[in-house]
């Protein structure tokens, strides 16, 4: 209901959908409400957490049996990188520099992922 108040939308409890709304997953108001409420944002059929994603690392939203998740699309991350290494006219030193940068990017992404998992555990209470 807090989300509806902030969006200026009337909350209507509907028998068939438990009062759900088509809330965009990246809606800043929804994200703020979930952050404020923490585990209280969960419902009978919902266990909500916030995933931070970055433009440099494409992600996909996946749904299986009613459970949604966000996962990096590693294929898209690395296809461009491999193509650049293999097919662009780069010197060996430029290729090595790119590979070192990609290694740093991967280490950074792993660190961010670990932090997201910690945040997720805190949200679940």
Image (cartoon, grey):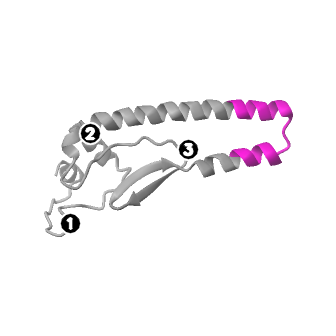
Residue drawn at x 16%, y 52% is 1
**Residue projecting furthest to the bottom:** 16
* Start-end of magenta stretch: 81-100
Residue drawn at x 22%, y 50% is 3
Task: Tell me the mark number nearer the camera, choosing from 2 and 1.
Answer: 2
**Where residue 66 sits: x, y (%)?**
32, 60
Q: Is residue 93 left or right of residue 20?
A: right
Residue drawn at x 17%, y 62% is 18
Q: Which residue is mark 3?
A: 57
Looking at marks 3 and 1 on the same chain, the residue that comes earlier in the sequence is marked by 1
**Where residue 32 sits: x, y (%)?**
29, 41
Q: Which residue is mark 1?
A: 17
Residue drawn at x 55%, y 31% is 108
Which one is in front, 30 or 44?
A: 44
For mark 2, give the secondary structure: helix
57 is within the stretch colored magenta: no
The Cα atoms of the two marked residues, 3 and 1, are separated by 34 Å
The Cα atoms of the two marked residues, 2 and 1, are separated by 23 Å
**Where residue 22 sits: x, y (%)?**
30, 61
Looking at marks 3 and 2 on the same chain, the residue that comes earlier in the sequence is marked by 3
Which one is in front, 65 or 55?
A: 65
Q: Which residue is mark 2?
A: 124
């Amino acid at each position: 209901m807090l989300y509806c108040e902030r969006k200026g939308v009337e909350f209507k409890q509907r028998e068939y959908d438990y009062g759900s709304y088509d809330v965009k997953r990246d809606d800043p108001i929804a994200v703020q409400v979930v952050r404020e409420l923490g585990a209280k944002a969960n419902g009978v059929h919902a266990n909500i957490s916030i995933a931070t994603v970055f433009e440099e690392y494409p992600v996909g939203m996946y749904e299986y049996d009613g459970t949604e998740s966000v996962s990096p699309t590693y294929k898209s991350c690395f296809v461009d990188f491999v193509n650049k290494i293999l097919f662009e006219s780069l010197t060996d030193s430029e290729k090595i520099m790119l590979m070192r940068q990609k290694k740093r990017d991967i280490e950074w992404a792993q660190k961010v992922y670990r932090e997201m998992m910690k945040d997720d555990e805190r949200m679940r209470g």
